[in-house]
Amino acid sequence: MNPSPELNTTLKQLRLSGVLDSLEQRNRQAIDGQLAYTEFLAMLLHDEVARRDQKKLRTRLARAGFAMGKTLETFDFDRLPNLNRTHIHDLATGRYIDEKVAILIAGPTGTGKSHLAQALGNCAARQGRDVVFATQTRLLNSLQAARATGTYERKLKQLASVPVLIVDDFALKPLRSPQDEDFHDLIAERYETAATILTSNLDFSEWGDAFAGNRILGAATLDRLRHGAYRIVLDGDSFRTPRPLPEPDQTRLAKSTKKTHP
């Protein structure tokens, strides 16, 4: 059954495109299965809810700013044998979000810190949570720009209210004034109210070096981040290291270099 023009128009006016898209299929199922009217209606409404949920998810993922393909399914655990896979999947359920604590990820360059952080953020988005992913530089630049336009407090409140904030490459560059103050303000606002994920190339013991200009402020900031936080260390080989080429086939090599005589 194709919907009549009148029904088509009404469904569009009500923004029930999920119902419109599945009406013909569900009508056939209702006839074949001899469903009651309420069962038929329930299926149509379920389709509409599913469509809206998918639309919301696409919007959340787009706003988050993730790179393509950075999911838990594509994360190569095999290259990190010391990483507790069960622990990561437990965090992926979102418990740290409910606990309003941080996840701190440290490890050398190329070990997958950014991928893992975005993968956890991706899981959070699929659970209906808003997520923002940004490098330390981009995050602090946005706060600095807000200062210049007189919208700092509004920007700070916006970032403080995001359920999951992911800061990539923390301490890659030292925090100069007023960046160190901005970062402290943000972490202080989020403390015990929202979850934060940080990645860094530095060992945890070296994170204080990011606040070389104001170590007291740095200690206060890191104390809030560390309180109740989950710490993850990635200590495998770099994912960016080229894989070695296979050894040449000596038999084939000998044949290809063998001289032929007329």
Image (cartoon, helix red, strand yellow):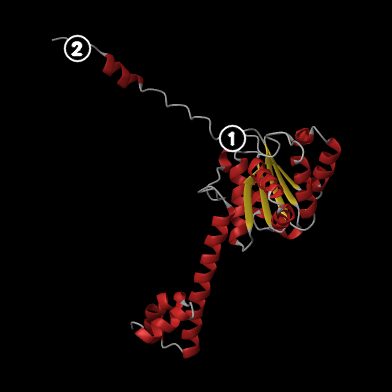
Give the percent coordinates (x, y) of residue 102. Answer: 74, 50
Quarter where residue 209 is shown: top right
Q: At label 2, which amino acid type do we have?
A: Thr
Task: Name which residue lies at 52% across and 61% down.
Answer: 58
For label 2, the residue is 260
In-image side of 160 versus 63 (left or right) = right
Percent position (x, y) of residue 31?
38, 86
User: What numbered label is drawn on residue 110?
Assistant: 1
Q: Earlier in the sequence, mark 1 or mark 2?
A: 1
Q: Quadrant of residue 183?
A: top right
Nearer to us: label 1 or label 2: 1
Q: Nearer the viewer, residue 214 or 110?
A: 214
The quadrant in which the N terminus is found is bottom left
Answer with left or right where residue 195 lies relative to residue 253.
right
- Is 158 rendered above or below residue 177? below
Percent position (x, y) of residue 68? 50, 48
Task: Classify mark 1: residues with Cα within 10 Å, few (<14), some (14-19) or many (20+).
Answer: some
Q: Residue furthest top?
A: 261
Spatial separation of the CA atoms under disc 1 and disc 2 = 48 Å
**Mark 2 nearby-residue class (10 Å; few <14, some 14–19, many ≥20):** few
Query: Quick check: 99 above or below 197?
Result: below
**As displayed, is residue 256 above or below residue 110?**
above
Instruction: Tell me whether the residue at label 1 lies in contact with that at label 2, contact meaning CB atoms closer than 8 angstroms.
Output: no
Q: Residue at x 76, y 41 (%)?
A: 178
Label 1, secondary structure: give it. Answer: loop
Q: Quadrant of the C terminus?
A: top left
Nearest the viewer among 107 and 195 is 195
Q: Position of residue 154 (x, y in %)?
A: 71, 57
Residue at x 57%, y 33% (from the top left corner)? 238
